[in-house]
Image (tube, rainbow, N blue to C red):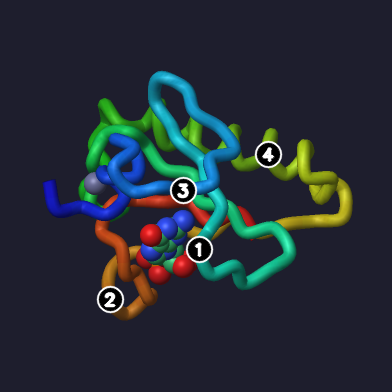
């Protein structure tokens, strides 16, 4: 397995986890670009948003909902936050396992 985020899912690379369930892991970004910078990822390896299939729609929706719940826990849901998913090189995607940035 060569994917960095699959290794984080498997616990082979440490990460500061803030949430885990059957479908998702959420953890602190190693190089935060905002006071809150968390990545929400599916446990299933999906390389880019282009690779999301109809059967993945549930987990992608769950990622959005989890980001909102973590934003609430961090006290930024009223003040405001962004969710970003970069797709491919021109958008700056560097890890090819989909991840939702919560900033
Ligand atoms: P992208 O540029 O692909 O949208 O975002 C990748 C993100 O993953 C970056 O914000 C980067 O800081 C983060 N990242 C890269 N490697 C690691 C790592 O080993 N651990 C954690 N926690 N975050 C990482
Ligand atoms: Zn992966």
Question: Which residue lies most toward the top here?
Answer: 22
Residues tagged 2 and 1 counted as in contact (Cβ below 8 A): no
> For the residue labelled by badge 2, is the local secondary structure a helix, a strand or a loop?
helix
The mark lying in front, picked from 2 and 3, is 3
Secondary structure type for disc 1: loop
Q: Which residue is mark 2?
A: 89
Is ligand 1 within 8 Å of the beta carbon of the residue shown at mark 1? yes
Residue at label 3? 15
103 shown above or below 91: above
- Which is more N-terminal, label 4 or label 2? 4
User: Which percent across, then down, holds residue 21?
Assistant: 47, 22
The structure residue drawn at horizontal position 77% and vertical position 37%, both measured from the top left corner, is 73
Image position, residue 50 (x, y; %): 25, 53
**Under tag 3, what secondary structure?**
loop
Label 3: how many residues lie within 10 Å, few (<14), some (14-19) or many (20+)? some
Give the total number of marks visible in the rendering: 4
Q: Which residue lies at the image location 32% right of the left edge and 80% below the top edge?
A: 90
Q: Is residue 63 visible?
A: yes
User: How far apart, in angstroms, are the residues tagged by discs 2 and 3?
Assistant: 24 Å
Q: Is residue 29 left or right of residue 70?
A: left
| Residue occupying the point 34% across, 37% down | 11
Label whose residue precedes the other's in the sequence (1 or 3): 3
Question: Ligand 1 within 8 A of label 3's CB?
Answer: yes
Q: Residues within 10 Å of mark 2 (few under 14, many from 20)?
A: few
Residue at image mark 4: 70
Q: CA distance from mark 3 to mark 4?
A: 16 Å
């Amino acid at each position: 397995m060569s994917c960095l985020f699959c290794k984080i899912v498997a616990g082979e690379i440490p990460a500061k986890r803030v949430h885990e369930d059957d479908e998702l892991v959420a953890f602190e970004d190693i190089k935060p670009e905002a006071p809150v910078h968390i990545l929400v990822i599916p446990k299933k390896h999906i390389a880019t948003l282009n690779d999301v299939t109809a059967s993945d729609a549930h987990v992608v929706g769950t990622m959005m909902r989890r980001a909102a719940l973590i934003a609430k826990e961090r006290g930024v849901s009223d003040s405001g936050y962004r969710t970003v998913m970069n797709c491919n090189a021109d958008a700056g995607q560097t890890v090819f396992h989909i991840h939702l940035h919560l900033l």
